[in-house]
Amino acid sequence: MEITERQKSILEKLIEEYVKTAEPVASAALAKKHAFGIKPAMLRIEMEKLEKAGYLSQPFVSAGRIPTDKAYRFFVNNLLMRKEQRIGHKKSTERIKQFTGAKEDRPKATQELTRIISELTSSLVLSYLPEENLFFKEGWSQIIREPEFEDSRVFESFAKMIDSWEKDIIPEMDFSGEIKIFIGKENPSREAEGFSAIAGNLLLPDKERGVMAIFGPKRMEYDRNIDIINSIINIFSNDF
């Protein structure tokens, strides 16, 4: 099923709302905040169609709806087609551009940048320098604030996923070309069904390469995180 422009707009706004609240989104609440040019009853019908098409799911009876992996992938693909950067995200990337770390000390600079990115994204950030075989992880205190991690089992799965990325995935993965975005079951780690990752190459001196990856729940703010990791890749490529 190919969804209509109206359904695309509904899906985008529902995802944005779910990212903010981490709560299932009801049609009535969505109708109050956004003008789709249709009555609430018709909005409910449109959401039902999106659910039948596999873009939304209902966690329990009488609840609102939440995005599926298919919805997030559709949302992210649309983001990647857009070239403009939102004003709020420009403020974050300005902080990156002002980075004054000791660039002659590659490990120190990488660790500092990893910390900055974790603060800007409220996510767990993992960086890898293959020549030194060094990993840097920052953001545990950021990520545990997300409501998903109130469940200790979810946090345990997340920690196992990070461990598998560090030990097995990043050292073996080819990150050449565009940044890579893994949503839910797309993630190469078996522990990652509920999470997403955004990863990309860092071009270092003498054509050496490093990797930086942002991890969080599937409900992460993709547009901001994509902008930020692209900015950090540009800084390493142009300024190191």
Image (spheres, rainbow, N blue to C red):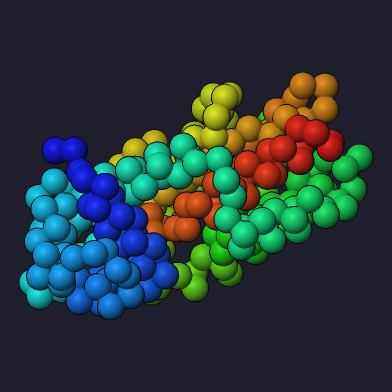
In this rendering, is residue 82 above or below 39? above
Residue furthest top as drawn: 207
* Near-viewer residue (62 or 206): 62
Rendering coords of residue 43 (x, y %): 16, 65
Looking at the rendering, in which quadrant would you find the N terminus? top left
Rendering coords of residue 12 (x, y %): 34, 56
The image quarter in which residue 194 lies: bottom left
Looking at the rendering, in which quadrant would you find the C terminus? top right
In this rendering, is residue 39 above or below 130? below
Rendering coords of residue 144 (x, y %): 49, 69
178 displayed left or right of 23: right
Rendering coords of residue 44 (x, y %): 12, 66
Residue visible at 76% across and 32% down?
A: 237
Q: Can the viewer see residue 59 in this picture?
A: no
* Near-viewer residue (202 or 33): 33
Residue visible at 77% across and 21% down?
A: 207
Question: For the image shown, how many numbered marks are present on the structure?
Answer: 0
The image quarter in which residue 116 lies: bottom right
192 displayed left or right of 80: left
Residue visible at 58% across and 24% down?
A: 176
Residue visible at 79% across and 50% down?
A: 97
Q: Can the viewer see residue 96 in this picture?
A: yes
